[in-house]
């Protein structure tokens, strides 16, 4: 237990150190500064970077602004690349790690930087130029990163079942203590099965109060309020029930995300901003949740909310509906 608690504290410390500076403007947007001159706007799903440039010496006056802005664009693109590499994918994993592991992700990031939109270009009186460039997180970038992340998750799941099967087949070779451990594992699994059965019964009791796939009042989006913890934004937050079952994103939602390249969720520090956001439509369902004890980027909901979420998932609600997370 001590080792586990130390590991959790270490991960939380790393995430806290990495989270950097955060700013919230009057509109409720959540912006995280990354690198020397870059920022991630988690409310709009975009990355921004600023660059400064100056013309080489002894150039004609009429070309100085042009050359200075050209140098500023190159500087802004370098800063944007640095900012993109630092975007948090999971609690302690950033885009750069995926770039190192996947040529496809690296190519996608380079393409995003090259095609970044110049949103500001200002020649200054001293002969220098300031340029701001912007690139979306959604689209090709999110598609390649999610594909790689989902593939890794599937591999881990397959490995777990493989090792579990090998362990069962070799159980007769284990000493008495190992047999005792196996018995304990069987007891835990039976308890998990019992808890799952109780959850099914609870779903039946709460079914008439849950959002129905056939109802005309089906919510148009989901707003998750995790204020009060130390939650941090990322490209791939996950939602779990208190019993540890992963609710979102499941396979159907992942397929929809990969198909259109949208982000799993957006983030804000203002509940009213989330309620007005077009991503969640006119009738968003607002739920209160908590941060996971194991990760600052994952969310835990109670079993009643979990049951309702499972119904929405079964109706393919998340294929189109947006998710906004409200955090401190």
Image (cartoon, helix red, strand yellow):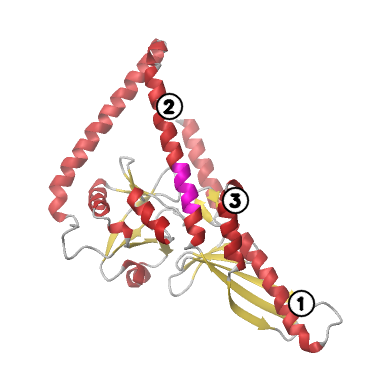
Segment colored magenta: 145-153
Q: Position of residue 167 (x, y in %)?
A: 40, 21
For marks 2 and 3 on the same chain, the one whose residue lies earlier in the sequence: 3
For marks 1 and 2 on the same chain, the one whose residue lies earlier in the sequence: 1
Look at the numbered disc 1 and give the secondary structure of its residue. Answer: strand
Q: Is residue 132 visible?
A: yes
> Which label sits in the foreground, 2 or 3?
3
Q: Which residue is mark 2?
A: 163
Residue extending farthest to the right is 58
- Number of residues whose C-alpha sits closer than 10 Å to that of mark 2, classed few (under 14), some (14–19) or many (20 or more): few
Q: Which residue is mark 3?
A: 103
Is residue 146 part of the magenta span, yes or no? yes
Is the magenta region chiefly helix, strand or loop?
A: helix
Q: Which residue is mark 1?
A: 54
Q: Position of residue 157 (x, y in %)?
A: 41, 37
For marks 3 and 1 on the same chain, the one whose residue lies earlier in the sequence: 1
Above or below 169: residue 262: below
The one nearer the camera, 68 or 197, is: 68
Q: Position of residue 307 (x, y in %)?
A: 23, 48
């Amino acid at each position: 237990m001590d080792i586990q608690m130390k590991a959790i504290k270490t991960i939380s410390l790393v995430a806290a150190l990495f989270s950097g500076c955060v700013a919230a403007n009057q509109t409720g947007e959540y912006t995280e500064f990354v690198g020397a001159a870059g920022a991630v706007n988690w409310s709009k799903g975009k990355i921004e970077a600023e660059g400064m440039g100056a013309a080489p010496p002894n150039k004609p006056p009429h070309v100085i602004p042009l050359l200075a802005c050209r140098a500023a664009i190159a500087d802004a693109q370098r800063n944007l690349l640095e900012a993109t590499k630092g975007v948090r994918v999971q609690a302690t994993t950033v885009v750069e790690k995926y770039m190192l592991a996947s040529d496809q992700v690296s190519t996608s990031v380079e393409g995003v930087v090259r095609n970044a939109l110049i949103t500001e270009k200002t020649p200054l009186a001293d002969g220098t130029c300031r340029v701001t460039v912007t690139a979306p997180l959604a689209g090709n970038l999110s598609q390649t990163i999610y594909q790689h992340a989902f593939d890794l998750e599937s591999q881990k799941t397959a490995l777990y079942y493989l090792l579990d099967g090998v362990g069962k087949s070799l159980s007769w070779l284990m000493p008495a203590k190992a047999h005792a451990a196996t018995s304990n594992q069987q007891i835990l699994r039976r308890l998990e099965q019992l808890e799952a059965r109780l959850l099914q019964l609870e779903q039946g009791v709460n079914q008439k109060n849950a959002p129905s796939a056939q109802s005309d009042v089906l919510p148009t989006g989901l707003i998750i309020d995790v204020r009060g913890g130390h939650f941090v934004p990322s490209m791939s937050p996950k939602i779990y029930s208190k019993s540890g079952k992963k609710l979102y994103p499941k396979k159907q939602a992942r397929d929809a995300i990969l198909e259109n390249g949208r982000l799993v969720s957006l983030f804000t520090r203002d509940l009213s901003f989330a309620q007005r956001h077009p991503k969640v439509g006119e009738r968003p369902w607002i739920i209160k949740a908590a941060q996971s004890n194991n990760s600052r980027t994952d969310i835990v909901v109670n079993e009643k909310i979990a049951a309702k979420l499972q119904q929405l998932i079964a109706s393919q609600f998340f294929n189109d509906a947006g998710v906004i997370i409200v955090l401190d």
